Image: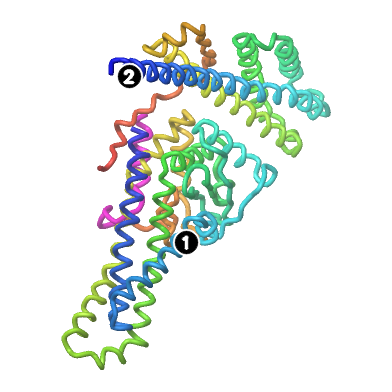
Amino acid sequence: MLYDQIAMNKRRTGYVMVGFGLLVLAIGAALGDLFWASWQSGIVIAAVVTAIYMAIMISQSTNVVMSMNHAREIKDVTAAPQLWHLVEDMALVAQVPMPRVFIIEDASPNAFATGNDPQHAAVAVTTGLLQRLNREELEGVIGHEMSHVRNYDIRLQTIALALSAAIGLLVSFSHNWFFWGGSRRRDDREGNAGAIGMVISLILIILAPLAASIAQMALSRNREYLADASSVELTRNPQGLIMALRKIDDSEPMKEADPNSSALYISDPFKKKQKFSDLFATHPPIADRIARLEKM
Amino acid sequence: MVAIILIIIVVLLVAWYISAYNGLIRTRTHVQESWSQIDVQLKRRNDLIPNLVSTTKGYANYEQSTLKKVVELRNQLTAVPADDHQQTMEVSNQLSTTLRSLFALSENYPDLKANTQFTQLMEELTNTENKIAYSRQLYNTSVANLTMKIQSFPSNVVANIHHFQASDYLQVPEEEKTAPKVNFDDFGQDK
């Protein structure tokens, strides 16, 4: 089951990257067509830009994600002995190397893990989490994060995050072009081709953010349930995680969290009301998670 | 032709034998490594206990009898021969239980709880206790892996030739036996 999950996560990372690559090339073609009347050069430029972007993102993902969430790294045990010890413990039982440890100055209790693989992983917790949770509860949360690390959830989540950020960049670029640069080229086009280009570009601009959210959806909510179960497998103490989730649920939204990263956190940092549909929620309802843990 | 086939079979057998042997060695090394992890933590705890005694010295009435028992058990633990894992863990478990009750009793001493040196020491000791429990869990897992290789066919052939022996599981103290069984069936995954 666990190994299925790991294999599936690696496979899905591939799908997400291929899908995103195709989308970027399509956007490149549309922009090239409208800008330089040459969709081929658009594709080439988009491919080169994306390749560079991805290379930087994959090699730097941890640092990028951490700085987006205003996290600072702690280098040794003295800064936060209890946190450091618990991360050590969970790395020991999960049999993964010790990850880097970060702290976010935010009164709301929350935590997340990121990185490309267990050898290059990092966990971050808020100061609110350290203040409000006792040792047992904190252990449950760290166990949950280390499960994401061991299951390769972090790679999939980090790459999906990078991709949606990149798509956002391209979309805002084409928005700007529409309002400031576009009119000239559209004017000297002969009616038909110009109109088709317009339509394609419009469709892409509408589609791109949707595709980004589909990529985020690939990080299914079941992953959170699974990480909860794996956490209990590591700590052998469901009560700790249950109490922790209650405290996290019963708190104010975060101020320092980055909106694109919200799927990474153990619980939605913005406390959005899940009213009309759970379909687009990044996290399952906490009450549901607690109910499943209580059944253990 | 027949000679070639025979040679291929022999080469394959030798290759299998070597990999089975190496697999056994690797698993046995895991068992030894995970024992030494426990050992490191036991030594660490033994080093911390004199600090506990000196930190609580100023608090004359602080649970003298329990503290005395802790020191006795610590000395007993250092006297156990290094290769007697079962007895080491038995004394260690008693020490863990006594320390835990000492921690619980410290709730009654507000001055002591306000002492940062004492709280730091508590964190260190709790950390060591947890690490002992987790390394024991890991040790038992690696013992299970080794036992499986020694008993299951065909690796048991190699294990018999080279006299590999299964190690004993470490006893888990009663109060930790109530650990929940994790059931992943409730956690359906999407396809």
**Circle 1 sits on which residue?**
A258
Q: Which residue is mark 2?
A: B4
Q: Within 10 angstroms of label 1, few (less than 14), some, or many (20 or more) residues? A: some
Pointer 2: residues within 10 angstroms few (<14), some, or many (20+)? few
Q: Position of residue B35 (x, y in %)?
A: 60, 20
Question: Does residue A279 show up magenta in the picture?
Answer: yes
A190 vs A143, nearest the viewer: A190
- Judge left or right: residue A276 versus residue A50: left
| Quadrant of the image containing the C terminus of chain B | top left
Q: Is residue B32 above or below residue A152?
A: above
> Is residue A157 found inside the magenta-colored segment of the image?
no
Res B13 quadrant in image? top left
Residue depicted at x 42% and y 60%: A162
Nearest to the observer: residue B171 or residue B27: B27
Q: CA distance from mark 1 to mark 2?
A: 66 Å
Q: Which residues are magenta?
A: A275-296
Q: Give the residue at x 31% y 18%.
A: B5
Quadrant of the image occupied by residue A182: bottom left
Chain ID, mark 1: A
Q: Amino acid at mark 1?
A: Asp
Secondary structure of the residue carrying tag 1 is: loop
Q: Is B48 above or below relative to A203?
A: above
Residue A110 at x, y percent in the picture: 49, 50
Please state the chain letter of the residue tagged with numbered disc 2 in the rendered image.
B
Quadrant of the rendering where the N terminus of chain B is positioned: top left
